[in-house]
Image: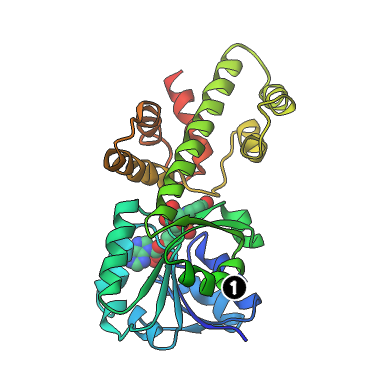
């Protein structure tokens, strides 16, 4: 039998992840700051809660899929926030992207309320969220992750056990640093080719046919060829994540010369388009 799950944050990622929890047989309660986004889930049988605190009362496990620390703090301690409810014995799974140091602090804060935190950001974008094939990067007590695994696997294809709380987020920082630098490298190389008179499709297909071909470049091919960037992972979120990555690198004592340059480019990109639109920054500079 499924669990009672409370889901907070029905954005690009959260809405399809919540739908997959229902498909797996869990009873779902939902809360979203903008209530209209819950409509398709309510039509499919989910229950709406008027506040995070109200949601907590009916949930064994609470999943957060929010923008970042400020949104989590608002959902915890704002009016009708989670911390206004008796949370003892609950498990909260944070699946949004946060700096590792924030995840560690969140774990301590929630432990004071008798809550077990699983630090479980995801690798994968809108399409894997819809297909239930996200890679879950989990940090936390092994027994808590074991207990939550059926819930996590309703949203993802695998759970990577990274270590204690904070390590899931540390893994996410490393993954997204590589994602941002690979995308920027592709944009810079394609822009050079275009400026040299080459056809964009020929450029991309040549890159994909050789040893550089990879899932990311294949996924972004049509965006670059069509010069259209329908949002999968918004550029503003990548810019946000690069801020978290910079903070994490400072905390860890890791140099970030490439990451800092890349962060400067994303800071000037069209924030509501997909992050592949970092290519537009090169076009503006050309
Ligand atoms: P999104 O579409 O922008 O959704 C963000 C969610 O956070 C919305 O439900 C929003 O509520 C809520 N929120 C923001 N500020 C809030 C506040 N102050 N109080 C209460 N709720 C607040 O973002 P997303 O793409 O789903 O991403 C969610 C998280 O997953 C982010 O950390 C992102 O970096 C990460 N992520 C995204 C992708 C991707 O490809 N999109 C992939 C992997 C990880 P409203 O609806 O009211 O605005």
Residue drawn where x is 33% and y is 30% of the image:
255
Q: Is residue 113 left or right of residue 217?
A: left
Tell me the element at label 1: helix
Estimate how packed mark 1 is, as few (under 14), some (14 to 19) or many (20 or more) residues with alpha carbons within 10 Å: some
26 in relation to 34, above or below:
below
Q: Quadrant of the N terminus?
A: bottom right
Give the tally of numbered discs: 1
Foreground residue, 47 or 164? 164
Q: Position of residue 269 (x, y in %)?
A: 42, 36
Does mark 1 have its CB less than 8 Å from ligand 1? Answer: no
Task: Give whichever of 274, 130 is nearer the camera.
Answer: 130
Ligand 1 placement by image quarter: bottom left
Q: Is residue 81 visible?
A: no
- The front one of 146 and 210 is 146
The x, y position of residue 69, in whole percent, is 31, 58
Residue 123 as seen in the image, left or right of residue 237: right
* Color scheme of the displayed model: rainbow
Establish if 151 lies above or below 185: below
Residue ID at (34%, 46%): 244
Residue 249, x across and y down, in percent: 32, 39
The residue identified by callout 1 is: 150
Q: Quadrant of residue 43?
A: bottom right
Residue at 59% across, 57% down: 134
As drawn, which residue projects farthest toward the right? 209
The quarter of the picture where residue 209 lies is top right
Position of residue 189 relative to residue 133, above or below, is above
Query: Residue at the location (29% across, 36% down)?
Result: 253
Nearer to us in this view, 194 or 237 = 237
Residue 266 location, x and y as percent?
40, 35
In the figure, 102 relative to 31: above or below?
above
Can I make out residue 149 in this image? yes
């Amino acid at each position: 039998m499924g669990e009672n799950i409370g889901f907070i944050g029905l954005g690009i990622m959260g809405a399809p992840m919540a739908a997959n929890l229902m498909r797996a047989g869990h009873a779902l309660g939902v809360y979203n700051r903008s209530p209209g986004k819950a409509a398709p889930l309510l039509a499919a049988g989910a229950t709406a809660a008027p506040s995070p605190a109200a949601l907590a009362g009916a949930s064994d496990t609470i999943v957060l899929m929010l923008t970042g620390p400020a949104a989590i703090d608002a959902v915890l301690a704002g009016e009708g926030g989670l911390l206004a409810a008796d949370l003892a014995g609950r498990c909260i799974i944070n699946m949004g992207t946060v700096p590792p140091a924030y995840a560690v602090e969140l774990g301590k804060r929630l432990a004071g309320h008798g809550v077990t935190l699983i630090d479980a950001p995801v690798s994968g974008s809108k399409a894997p969220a819809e297909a239930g094939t996200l890679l879950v990067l989990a940090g936390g007590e092994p027994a808590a992750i074991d207990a939550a695994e059926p819930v996590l696997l309703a949203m993802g294809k695998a759970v990577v056990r990274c270590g204690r709380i904070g390590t899931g987020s540390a893994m996410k920082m490393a993954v997204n640093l590589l994602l941002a630098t690979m995308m920027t490298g592709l944009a810079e190389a394609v822009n050079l080719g275009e400026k040299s008179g080459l056809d964009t499709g020929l450029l991309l297909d040549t890159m994909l046919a050789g040893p550089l071909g990879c899932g990311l470049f294949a996924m972004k091919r049509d965006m670059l060829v069509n010069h259209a960037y329908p949002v999968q992972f918004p550029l503003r979120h990548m810019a946000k994540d690069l801020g978290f990555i910079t903070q994490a690198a400072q905390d860890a004592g890791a140099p970030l010369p490439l990451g800092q340059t890349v962060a400067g480019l994303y800071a000037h990109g069209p924030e509501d388009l997909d992050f592949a639109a970092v290519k537009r920054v090169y076009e503006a500079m050309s």
